[in-house]
Amino acid sequence: MSLSLKGIILYFLVKYKFVPNFIERRKAIREDHLRYIRSAFRRGEVIAGGAYGELEDIAGGLIVFKLDCRERADQFVRKDPFYVSGLITSYEIHEWHVVVGLQ
């Protein structure tokens, strides 16, 4: 559980692990996922996001959030179309203590 102080903004790193053959399996819902994450970006909740791994075999995704509590990051993941459709096999949420940049 993260410390949430009223008025304090925290950064969180969310790391997704994807199913095998993710590139092929994501096609039907990729646009829904992108709309979902872009909406959070426009609200200022997502700072950046994208896939990691070799382009031929994407291993997972990483999203940087700017929120007031960890629970909001968890709620975001559980509503992400990739998660709902079973394309995310696991995820981790880490509070990120920024020392350089984004301050």
Image (spheres, rainbow, N blue to C red):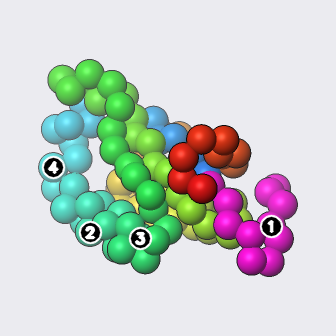
Residue 94 percent across, percent down from the top left: 66, 44
Residue type beneath disc 4: Lys
Q: Which residues are magenta?
A: 1-11
- Residue under circle 3? 40
Q: Is residue 70 above or below residue 51?
A: below
Residue type beneath disc 2: Arg
Residue 78 visible in image: no
Q: Is residue 8 left or right of residue 88?
A: right
Of the numbered discs in the image, which one, if any, rests on residue 38? none
- Residue under circle 4? 27
Residue 103 visible in image: yes
Task: Write the residue at 41% across / 70% down.
Answer: 40
Count neighbours of disc 2 (C-alpha within 10 A) and say few if under 14, some if 14 to 19, many if 20 or more: few
Q: Is residue 52 left or right of residue 73?
A: left
- Residue 4 part of the magenta segment: yes
Count neighbours of disc 4 (C-alpha within 10 A) and say few if under 14, some if 14 to 19, many if 20 or more: few
N-term-proximal mark, 1 vs 4: 1
Residue type beneath disc 1: Ser
Q: Is residue 84 above or below residue 15?
A: below
- Residue under circle 1? 4
Q: Is residue 16 above or below residue 37?
A: above
Task: Write the residue at 70% across / 45% down.
Answer: 97
Task: Write the residue at 80% across / 57% down.
Answer: 2
Q: Nearer the viewer, mark 1 or mark 2?
A: 1
N-term-proximal mark, 1 vs 2: 1
Which one is in front, 11 or 38? 11
